[in-house]
Image (cartoon, grey):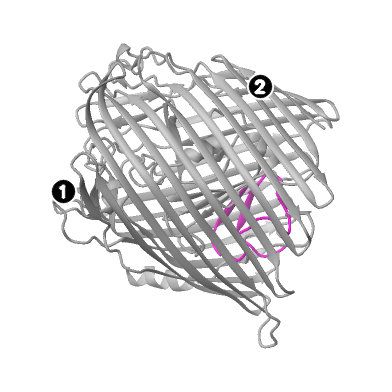
Amino acid sequence: MTYVQTAAAATMLVLCAPAGAQTDGHHHDTPGASPDTVFSVGDIVVTARDAAPGDVLTSVDRLGADVAQRQSVDNAWEVFARLPGVTLTDFNQGTTSGRFSIRGFNGEGEINAVKLLIDGVPANANDGGMPFIDGVMPLDIAAVELVRGTADPRYGLHAIAGSADITTRIGGTYLDTRGFVGAFGTAEAQLAAGVETGRFSQNYFLGYRRSDGFRDHAGLDRVSFAGKWFYDGGAVRVGAIVRQAVVEADEPGYLTDADAYTDRRRSYALSAQDGGRRQTDQYSLHLDADLTDAVSFSAKGYANGLIDDRYVRFSAAVAQQRRLTREQQYGALATLHYHPAVTFVHALTIDVGGDVQVQDNRSLRWLTQDRRITSQTRDQAFGLTVAGGYIQASVEPAAWLRITPAWRFDVVSGTLTNRLNGQRYPINDYGTISQPKLSVAVTPIAGVTAYGNYGRTFQIGVGAGAYKVPPRTLDLDPSINAGWEAGVKLARGRWLQARLAAWRQTASGEIKRRLNDPSGDSDNLGATRRQGIDVQLTLAPVTGVSVWGAYSRQRARIVTPDPATPSQAGNRIDHVPQNLFSAGLDIVPLPRWRVSLWGNGQSSYELTPANTLPRYGAYLVVAGEVAWRMMPRLEVAVQVRNIGDRAYEYVWFDGTQVLHSPAEGRALGGSIRLTL
């Protein structure tokens, strides 16, 4: 770091107040009520039992239920389009639909840098992907929380750039149904129900969505179910959650340069047998207990199951593949929260937590012809166990100052067996992965918080890349991501919230998964640097009118490349747009009417780390909705996606040619929602 950068890093040690301080009872989270760095989209309801991040001192974005539940999307990850500064990667290939990413990381699947949780339960696959998000549909979402950066000590594995927690509806008595029909043969039905009797609550969700898809051979069928049972005894609350989903979908494949802009809805005959079936299962037990007035304890135990069976052929020059993934995941998370009464400081909180995540995985691949197996190219069985712990102290020497030091450590173990040759390989000895963190917040006046943080996260190999498979004989070190952030949050009642943040994150030796390699191994990308600026604003000048906007400028570069590719020094990392922007307008012109207009977009990106090909991927799309509440509990709405019918796409390079996956054109749909 230069002198100026070092000074900036020191100055930035002024971090925010708690992102989600827990309170007694229910209340609406009012911007500006307390010093924080939370940027909220929609109304947020916080309860004393919510899995809020407590003293997470970094930039946090929240999406409220009122916005999330209105979304009509094929896949739940698309809901993240309503949060600022999020990159969306839309493969539009059946069950492999896409994902979201943040902080200069792409969504290609080579490096998955976001820890996903659903109701506080880890929900990433071994490679960091997010297939378990299939178990969630919009009507069951209570809130979405996106925690950015390296300062959060709660999570280790996959939390390279931050974490995202989707909280679903738990507690209450209600019956909520929503039906939707729209373009491209889309039909959806969702039902959410809750029954709370005394101290016992039951919540259920059932959802179904089908679509023919914008392109030929792009049909989708999804069924999702969730059941949640909780008993609240006052000082102790226990519960269980079951969540399951089954998705079957066809894949339209990719178009060449010659065809991508002439018939965007086309699917080649070579993709006629492509598609797959994915099943996800999540089971979890939850415990929250107030041990004393100053001590509370929470714990979760879980079991996840994934079966992903996919047939895919990328181009005429290669054979079709069958890819079968089977994962069984088990684990537990626990946190002890201590809030002692002390006289020498304004407030003191100590958190001690830990988690263990165990995986038993199978990864198989075959070459096929019209779904008939011709040969096998992979049969790997591998176990992975990651155990970690952390301690964090939140110290307030005065009401206007908060200092939060923390330290996290993780250890990794496991073995891989190549069932094609019977060989066993140990995991890399990553040692104890130490991750110190420090945050500070200053609140000079009410509603203004200057903040900053520093922290480290880590990346290890995924799949076979985590093990010492020849020709590798030496242990690899984990890639350490060191990051800082500095910013200011401004809030004035409910009519104004704004946040400006600058950030940087460097990796000591980043690795990326080989996406189309039978070995399942990884490549060394090298030392990298990501940095950017985030600007966010929400303004409600008069009752019934809300305007919001966000802009992120980000750069992701290779600083020291792999010795085999020295020419990549200084190059941009592929599929990372430099500019992300979003904006919207919400109006309630009459008591029963609601009008919304929103849009998001990005600039173009490089297709490879070599930076030698033309850039693609820029877009700007706008959507709108008009809703009318016919009766107090019945609302009808009309929604138009991609109002301008803009042609945009996901693009990649397979080593010989550029391939395109066109995104959806203009789509009109209508919904009816009944709430009892």
Judged from the image, the secondary structure of the residue bearing numbered disc 1 is loop
Magenta-tinted stretch: 34-62
| Residue for point 24% across, 60% down | 476
Q: Is residue 39 magenta?
A: yes
Near mark 2 (Cα within 10 A), the count class, few <14, some 14-19 or many ≥20, is many
Please check the rendered image and state whether residue 375 is part of the magenta-colored stretch, yes or no.
no
Task: Judge by depth and name the residue closer to the eye, 474 or 15.
Answer: 474
Which residue occupies the foreground of this view, 508 or 489? 508
In this figure, which residue is indicated by the disc labeled 1? 565
Q: Quadrant of the C terminus?
A: top right
Residue placed furthest toward the bottom:
344
Q: Amino acid at mark 2?
A: Phe
Near mark 1 (Cα within 10 A), the count class, few <14, some 14-19 or many ≥20, is: some
For the N terminus, the quadrant is bottom left
> In the picture, residue 106 is in which quadrant?
top left
Residue pictured at 53% horizontal, 39% vertical: 281
Q: Earlier in the sequence, mark 1 or mark 2?
A: 2
Q: What label does residue 188 carry, if any?
A: none
Asked whether residue 345 appears in the rendered view, the answer is yes
Q: Mark 1 to mark 2: distance in Å?
A: 50 Å
> Mark 1 and 2 residues: CB-CB less than 8 Å, in contact?
no
Residue 314 shown left or right of residue 335 in the figure: left
Three-letter code for the amino acid on which mark 1 is drawn: Thr
Q: Is residue 556 above or below residue 226?
A: below
- Horizontal side of 34 relative to 25 (left or right) equals left
Res. 257 image quadrant: top left
| Residue topped by disc 2 | 180
Spot occupied by residue 246 in the image (x, y as percentages of width and height): 52, 29
Asked if residue 98 is positioned above or below residue 198 in the image, the reply reads: above
